[in-house]
Image (cartoon, rainbow, N blue to C red):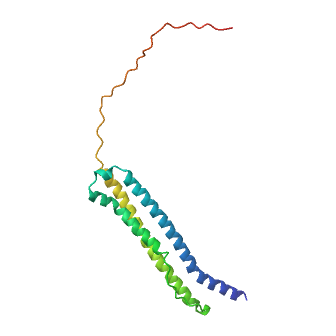
Amino acid sequence: MEAREQATFWERYLLESPIKDIEVIDGAARQLITVTTLLQGIYFAAIALSDFKKQAAPWQLAVLLIPAVLWLVSLLLAMVTFVPVSRTIPRDSSRQDLVRQKLVEIARKKYRTLRASFYVLLVSMVLLFVNVLIYLSWIPPAAPASTATSVPSVTSTLPVSSPVPVTPTP
């Protein structure tokens, strides 16, 4: 009896593990989507608030937008993991090996797509770092401050009077 319970446990575990893998992959895809949209928002706000876009040539702006394009690709790949997959899984419980095989196949496809999304995000982060360095090199140097500083003199316009003696009160 105990051997049969163990066999049932392991059969259930082998069948449910791909389902749990799919849930983990979906959770990671949600995190990638959150990070990607947050980066896009911060990056576009930084570009919109900077004066650089007024001074830059169109090709310079295009170079600065490469990470944003990669973030869109990463976002789309992460979203693809949520697309429902046609499941032609047999309902017959005696065919659990086929059910498990199909679930493993679905999990592998989702994992490959999620991994591609991650690598695109990683490349975009490297390009973002390079773009920050390029941006800093394109900023014109600030005008040197003059070395002669004048300190305004403070003169009192009140008449100087003699000090008033203070007598203690009992």
Compared with 3, 42 (above or below) is above
Q: Residue at x 29, y 44 (%)?
A: 141
Which is nearer the eye, 33 or 93?
A: 33
Compared with 48, 86 (above or below) is below
Q: Residue at x 46, y 79 (%)?
A: 109
Q: Residue at x 61, y 81 (%)?
A: 13
Q: Position of residue 26 (x, y in %)?
A: 52, 73
Please identify the residue farthest to the right as the structure is shown. Answer: 1
Q: Position of residue 80 (x, y in %)?
A: 45, 75
Using the rendered view, name the quadrant where residue 96 is placed: bottom right
Q: Is residue 92 left or right of residue 153?
A: right
Q: Position of residue 1 (x, y in %)?
A: 73, 89
Q: Is residue 141 left or right of residue 87?
A: left
Q: Position of residue 126 (x, y in %)?
A: 37, 61
Which is nearer the eye, 52 or 21?
A: 52
Compared with 160, 51 (above or below) is below
Q: Residue at x 31, y 58 (%)?
A: 61
The C terminus - image quarter: top right
